[in-house]
Image (cartoon, helix red, strand yellow):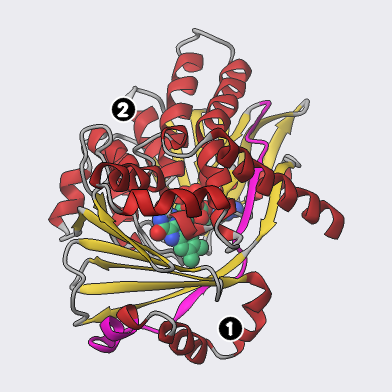
């Protein structure tokens, strides 16, 4: 009998397992893939996310594998050019850009070092229920016999399609639709990147671009298109990449100075939702609970936030300070309250629509003032509360975009 079984050993599951084991609890962590393997995802870890790694003592391991620390961000919004540094968060004043096979390995190794029992290449095929309550799992290692394991709580850290979410029939209570498709590739020898990340937004052509240096002397270039173009983009990825880069000559020149080292990969399934993330004997963390477009590079930070809150709540329950189901409900409420604002901002950006009047009005002043630039970039990075930068009408507009996405989605369904 385990205290907790966690399905999925990446940004949500591995830190949660580590935190529970460090607190003395007996944890089983399983993943159907090899621990620390690569996954389709870019990997901009904002300083808000990195502050968790700092708190957990894992930032040095990230530096040791040569992960760039990103100090400066340039944000090109049509003809407005912002360049600055976001305020720090939790004692960390840079962002980090670790390839996922480095980051995920560091996370899972930390869990195993803390005493977690790990089983890789182990697929969970069934949840065990007792009177409506999740009490365990059934599954098997690749090529192995099926086994059952029991725990006081079972956590799905199992990604956007969440097997656990499906088994417990957890509804998407906010479902703001899909608005972009995104594809990326790695380049060597690209000039002018240094320790800076750059974002480019072309509101007329409805394109968004992100580029940053990463491990092993490579640079990552990520392009977003409106989802209506997904078919066209997938039919000719190389052509779509080349054509879209032409719209941003500065980035096109940088890319042309390097050599593409990988194929272009990405996804057209980038939904925006909150899924009910708790119930009797179960909880969801990371993408399983909350998925949003990668345009704001918020997923890894969200998964760390979930792990941090849920470990605290489950810890209280396992210490008999509160009933488990009350703790799980508290986790779900807290994560929603903490992450909904950035979710709204993300959906708003992902819609790749003309800039709202309020933003058009504020950008010239922001461009000419270092403190305002820092705050604007900090809002994107999550180190400055959104309501310190954007007026209430704009925050309402972000929330209204989510509502609109939700309504359109419901109509289509
Ligand atoms: C194209 C793209 C670019 C992105 N770029 C960024 C970025 O720059 N910055 C950022 O912060 N976020 C980014 N994200 C988001 C980020 O990848 C996710 O938020 C993050 O991976 C979520 O981690 P997770 O642990 O919740 O889930 P996942 O990373 O999806 O891991 C889930 C794990 O569960 C396992 N699993 C699933 N079902 C089972 C089962 N039945 N049995 C056993 N194991 C199972 C899977 O094998 C998998 O390893 C990007 C995403 C995409 C798609």
Of helix, strand and loop, which one carries label 1?
helix
Q: Position of residue 139 (x, y in %)?
A: 60, 50
Q: Would residue 363 appear left or right of 69 to someone viewing this image?
A: right
Q: Would residue 241 appear left or right of 153 to someone viewing this image?
A: left
Does the beta carbon of the residue at mark 2 sit less than 8 Å from ligand 1? no
Q: Which numbered disc flags the more N-terminal residue, 1 or 2?
A: 2
Q: Would residue 202 appear left or right of 19 to someone viewing this image?
A: right
227 or 27, which is in the foreground?
Answer: 227
Q: Is residue 8 visible?
A: no
Where is mark 1, residue-wise?
233
Q: State the residue lying farthest toward the top.
A: 321
Q: Residue at x 71, y 48 (%)?
A: 175
Of helix, strand and loop, which one carries label 2?
helix
Estimate how packed mark 1 is, as few (under 14), some (14 to 19) or many (20 or more) residues with alpha carbons within 10 Å. many
Q: Which residues are magenta?
A: 252-280
Query: 87 above or below 68?
Result: above
Q: Residue at x 66, y 82 (%)?
A: 231
The image's mark for residue 175 is none
Where is mark 2, residue-wise?
22
Q: Position of residue 384 (x, y in %)?
A: 36, 36
Quarter placement of the C terminus? bottom right
Q: Residue at x 16, y 53 (%)?
A: 63
Residue 284 sits in which quadrant?
Answer: top right
Q: Is residue 154 visible?
A: yes
Mark 1–mark 2 Cα distance, whole angstroms, equals 46 Å
Magenta-span inclusion, residue 257: yes
CB contact under 8 Å: marks 1 and 2: no
């Amino acid at each position: 009998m385990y205290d907790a079984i966690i399905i999925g050993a990446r940004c949500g599951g591995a830190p949660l397992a580590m935190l529970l084991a460090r607190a003395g609890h007996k944890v089983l962590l399983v993943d159907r893939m090899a621990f620390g393997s690569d996954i389709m995802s870019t990997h901009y870890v904002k300083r808000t996310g990195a502050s968790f790694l700092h708190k957990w003592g894992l930032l040095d391991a990230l530096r040791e594998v040569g992960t760039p620390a990103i100090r400066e961000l340039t944000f090109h919004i049509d003809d407005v050019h912002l360049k600055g540094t976001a305020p720090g968060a939790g004692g960390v004043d840079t962002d980090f850009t670790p390839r996922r096979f480095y980051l995920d390995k560091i996370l899972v190794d930390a869990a195993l070092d803390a005493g977690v029992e790990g089983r890789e290449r182990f697929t969970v095929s069934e949840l065990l229920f007792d009177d409506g309550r999740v009490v365990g799992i059934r599954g098997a290692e690749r090529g192995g016999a099926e086994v059952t394991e029991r725990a006081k709580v079972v956590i799905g850290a199992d990604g956007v399609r969440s097997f656990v979410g499906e088994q417990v029939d957890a509804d998407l209570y906010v479902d703001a639709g899909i608005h972009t498709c995104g594809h990326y590739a790695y380049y060597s020898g690209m000039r002018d990147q240094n320790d800076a990340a750059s974002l480019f937004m072309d509101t007329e052509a409805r394109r968004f671009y992100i580029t940053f240096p990463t491990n092993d002397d490579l640079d990552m270039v990520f392009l977003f298109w409106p989802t209506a173009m997904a078919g066209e983009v997938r039919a000719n990825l190389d052509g779509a990449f080349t054509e879209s880069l032409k719209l941003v000559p500065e980035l096109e020149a940088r890319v042309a100075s390097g050599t593409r080292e990988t194929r272009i990969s990405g996804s057209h399934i980038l939904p925006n939702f909150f899924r009910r993330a708790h119930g009797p004997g179960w909880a969801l963390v990371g993408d399983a609970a909350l998925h949003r477009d990668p345009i704001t590079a918020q997923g890894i930070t969200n998964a760390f936030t979930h792990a941090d809150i849920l470990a605290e709540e489950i810890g209280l329950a396992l210490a008999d300070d509160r009933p488990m189901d009350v703790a799980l409900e508290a986790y779900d409420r807290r994560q929603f309250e903490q992450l909904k604002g950035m979710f709204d901002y993300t959906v708003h950006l992902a819609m790749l629509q003309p800039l709202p009047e309020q933003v058009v009005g504020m950008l010239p002043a922001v461009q000419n003032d270092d403190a305002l630039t820092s705050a604007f970039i900090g809002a994107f990075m999550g180190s400055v509360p959104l309501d310190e930068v954007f007026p209430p009408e704009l925050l309402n507009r972000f929330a209204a975009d989510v509502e609109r996405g939700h309504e359109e989605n419901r109509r289509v369904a």
